[in-house]
Image: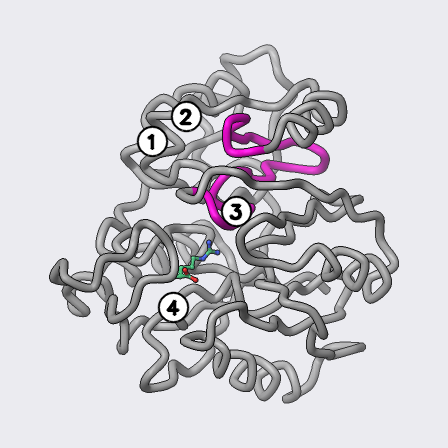
Amino acid sequence: MPHEQAEQTTYEQRKASPRRYLMCRPIYFDVTYSINPWMDPARPTSTQTGLAQWKGLFDTFVTLGHDVQLIEPVPGLPDMVFAANGALVVDGKALVARFRHPQRRDESAAYLEWFGRGGWSTVGQAEYVNEGEGDFLFTGGAILAGTGFRSDPRAHDEVREFFGRPVISLTLVDPRFYHLDTALSVLGDEQIMYYPEAFSLQSRAELAERFPDAILAEEADAAVFGLNALSDGFNVVLPQAAVGLAARLRERGYHPVGADLNELLKAGGSVKCCTLELRE
Ligand code: ARG
C-alpha cells in the first residue's frame, strides 16, 4: 500500500478499505446544454479526451483495489457519465434520483433498471427532486444533505425516512458549487474537507460545530473542483490541479492521488461526480 507520508504525521495511520463503485463510460459525453455555470455549449468538447481521462480514473480505482461496476450509457444523455447523481446507496438500500432538469430526467430509468437487477434490500425512486450522491454524502453515521440549487429540501426528509439515518441539511449559496459534492468531501468516518464560502452562514456554523477537525479548502482549490474528491479512508483521489488541498491531505496522513478530468470539468463534474459508491 502506498503510504510514504503517513508515518511522518502525528495522526494515526489512516486505513484504506476496498470500495464498490458504479461508473458510466462517457461515450456520449458532450456539452449540448447549460444547467450549471461551468457548461458552455459554444466551447468545443472532445468525447475522445473525456473518455481517455475517465479511463484514467477507472484504472486508478482498480489499481487502488476497488471493485468498479459499470452502467450502460444511454444515447442522448450526455451527462450520464456523472454516475454520482444516479442514486444514493447506503446499508444495501438504493434510492434512485429524480433530476431537476428535463435534460437529465431519463437517467433515472436506467438506474432503476440497473438496481432492479437485484442485490439490494430495497430499491425506490425519490419522490422529490434528489440528485443522489451529488447532494447526499454519507459520513459513516449521518447523511449530509445539500440544497439550494438542485435537490429539494423535502428530499432531505425523504432520505431520512428511507434510510432511517440522521440527515443534516446544508444550504449551498455559490452557483459554481451547485451540488454538495462540489463543495464538501467525506474523507473518513466523521472526517470531512469543505469550502466554507460555498455554504450559507447557518450551514457554515453547523459544519464548524460538527466537524471542528475538518480541512478547510481555499478558493483556488475549490475553483478547480478539488473538493470533488473520493476517499477510501487513506487514498484520496482528487483533481490534480488542487495542489493546496493535496498538501493539506498529506499533512493529515492521507495519500492524495491526482486525476486529470479537465474535459469533464467543462460539464461541471470531476472525480466524485463520476463515481457512485455502492454500500452494502
Ligand atoms: N452537467 C452535470 C449537471 O449539471 C454535472 C453533474 C456533476 N455531478 C456531480 N455529482 N456534481 O447536472
The mark nearer the N terminus, 2 or 4, is: 4
Q: Which residue is mark 3?
A: 181
The reply to whether the residue tagged 3 has its Cβ within 8 angstroms of ligand 1 is yes
Residue type, numbered disc 4: Val
Residue type, numbered disc 2: Leu
The mark nearer the N terminus, 1 or 4, is: 4
Residue 126 image point, x, y percent = 70, 73
Name the residue at 19% across, 69% down: 47
Residue type, numbered disc 1: Ala
Q: How is the image coloured?
A: one colour
The mark nearer the N terminus, 3 or 1, is: 3
Specify the segment rendered in magenta.
177-199
Real-space CA distance between mark 3 and mark 4, rounded to the nearest whole angstrom: 15 Å
**Which label sits in the foreground, 3 or 1?**
3
The reply to whether the residue tagged 2 has its Cβ within 8 angstroms of ligand 1 is no
Q: Which label is found at residue 81? A: 4
Real-space CA distance between mark 3 and mark 1, rounded to the nearest whole angstrom: 15 Å
Real-space CA distance between mark 1 and mark 4, rounded to the nearest whole angstrom: 22 Å
Residue type, numbered disc 3: Asp
Total numbered badges shown on the rendered structure: 4
The quadrant where residue 161 appears = bottom right
Q: Which residue is mark 1?
A: 242
Mark 4 Cα-neighbour bin, 10 Å: few <14, some 14–19, many ≥20: many
- Give SS at disc 4: loop
The mark nearer the N terminus, 3 or 2, is: 3
The residue closer to the viewer here, 136 or 35, is 35
Q: Which residue is mark 2?
A: 245
